[in-house]
Amino acid sequence: MRVVRLDHETDFDGWRGQARSLLVDGIPPQDVAWQVGTAQADLFGALERPLDPREPSRRLRVPKQFLSDAKLAICNRDPGRFDLLYRLLWRIQQTPELLTNTVDDDVYQFEKLIKSVRRDRHKMRAFVRFRSVKGEADTYVAWFEPEHHILEENAEFFVRRFANMRWSILTPEGSAHWNRERLAFGPGANRADAPDSDALEELWRGYYAAIFNPARLKVKAMTSEMPKKYWKNLPEAALIKPLMASAHRAEKGMIDAEATPAKRQANYEFAANPPES
Amino acid sequence: MALLSRLEKLKILADAAKYDASCSSSGSTTRDSRGGKGVGSSEGMGICHAYTPDGRCISLLKVLMTNYCMFDCRFCVNRISSNVRRARFMPEDLAQLTIDFYKRNYIEGLFLSSGIIKSPDYTMEQLIEVARILRVREDFRGYIHLKTIPDADPLLLAEAGRLADRVSINVELPTRSGLAKFAPEKDETRIRDAMASTRDQIIGWKQERKRIKSAPRFAPAGQSTQMILGADGASDSEVLRSSTDLYGSYDLKRVYYSAFSPIPDASKDLPLQRPPLMREHRVYQADWLWRFYGFGLQDLDTAMEGGMLPLDIDPKLSWALQRRDLFPIDVNSAAKEQLLRVPGLGTKSVGSILSARRHGRLRLADIGKLCRNISKIRPFIVTQDWRPTALLDREGLRGMLAPKPKQLELAL
């Protein structure tokens, strides 16, 4: 058994280098144990020996698409991901078209990991809520709890979108900071490190409540796209239960109400000469 | 009248905007804020920043500039004869609000519409002014969807197209007679003229872009429209005839369907009942079958009973039950077009099947991995180890495949 150590949870370069050496040495996947960090030696710790990174003596098959997908899959929290990726790489040497076999168990699992990371990445882009920092112009901080290790992978998106703001995104495992010129990563943080409110949130909640149509209550459609685990960091989510509770009443009120006599003339005058404020 | 606060105005004008179903922010040009002075990006895929308990997404700040309106469209909460509270945002207010929300990552951009005040041209100019402040002064690179005002000057519509990612004008009702009855000030011919003009300008931009890369863009995310379901007596067959004609004639990106929903202070001319949400869902499914699954209008008619899609089963299953002669389909040899006809197989599953079967013959368990519910698909397919024999001929097949009735909404 070869025990292979990676520097951190998303050490893609480390994985790639080690996988290449293992492949060159012809070590089959079942003989490799992947570990992150230097935390503890396991049962086979005694057999561990560091691998020298080496140039492949024969040509290895590594489809480009596999590398970019593997980079995403490594962000997944699944502890078996390094193992799976090496097994796929091993099998690709024999079956170059392996990844198109969507019903193969390894390929299927690989796609599941990628899909879950993509979804988490997308939800982070959607549900990060910046709060402005009092006394500092155009500076914003958000607290977010991603499911997978996606902060570094995803930070570039926020740079592209908010290049001209100063911002930080804090998560339990790490933080990203943009000062309008450079992206830097720091250690994990606490919720209390981010501002606890933003004056705009009252308006945002007002909007959230007003755009909701009580006659169309479809709670499952909401929770499948905005699962409850995200609610605690969304300022608008506190409204969900009260809005649901009042929905039937609001709808019934609209149906039962008699149409009031139309104020057509008065409204026309306003529409023809609307107030400026 | 007392002055309304920004919050009160926002509540009134968002409440007034929510009956427009569109909230898409996808499919525009790729761009971001680097090298500029403002905020905003667009990367093809839209983002839904929140969901309300009606299951709808909030992608854009969807709001009216004003809900004062000179028109009297019966189905509309803002019609002149309605007694709802009225408010008005000035262009500067709206631009600021959009940026305030955007910087906190609440939204992808702005979807702006308006009641008609003073004149169609004046109203359109005000909407354009908001977009101009955002794009030109603030260098805003997020998404803008502008509703165009019927009967506004074509030059103004062109200006809107240059500033916005998407423009839309609502046909409102599926039939000409419905529109004449319920929206007396609107005219279908003029609405269609506006769509045709937008279509031509989008085509013009796309051609120009081939020669000059920097050609001024025109509504790169295309145009869309909306029709209300259940306000007039139009059948599903009429609705889909109308929408497929609109897709074909004006190269629309989307036709949105909006189940007529009870509104505050509703007109007495309209059915005041719960919105036909399941009907709306089935019409969307049929729309998808037409756009992505190769179904023609005739196929959709086959799925209907008396011009209406069944509510208890989806239109593809309904069609397949009527056309059992075409099944079962062998997943190991059928063409893509045939696979797309199998109830329960979506475009992605079909892609996976085509890809996987190059590696070997597929078994039922393999198909099970690629779809959500194999038991619904099984009666219609043949695999290496499965053939549905008598299942297809069964009288009770529909009952077996229809989803069990359940409580529509469960508590959280």
Image: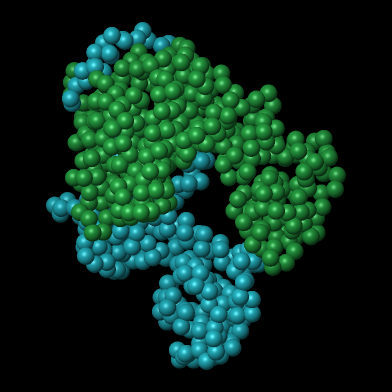
Tell me the quadrant of the picture where the N terminus of chain A can be found: bottom right
B366 above or below B275?
below
> In which quadrant of the rendered view does residue B30 lie?
bottom left
Residue at 26% of width from left, 10% of height from top? A266
A211 above or below A81?
above
Residue at 66% of width from left, 58% of height from top? B353
Q: Residue furthest left?
A: A135
- For this view, does B130 lie left or right of residue A253? left
- For this view, does B393 lie left or right of residue A31? right
Image location (x, y in percent) of residue A69:
49, 68
> In which quadrant of the rendered view does residue A9 lie?
bottom left
Answer yes or no: is residue A68 visible.
yes
Image location (x, y in percent) of residue A76:
48, 66
Image location (x, y in percent) of residue B65:
28, 30
Q: Residue furthest front?
A: B211
Image location (x, y in percent) of residue B399:
75, 35
B346 above or below A69?
above
Residue at 22% of width from left, 55% of height from top? B36
Judging by colour alone, the chain drawn in green in this rendered image is B
Q: Colour of chain A?
A: cyan
B86 above or below A78?
above
**Depth order, front residue of A62/B162:** B162
**Depth order, front residue of A81/A35:** A81
Answer yes or no: is residue A200 visible.
no
**Depth order, front residue of B244/B114:** B244
Residue at 18% of width from left, 45% of height from top? B137
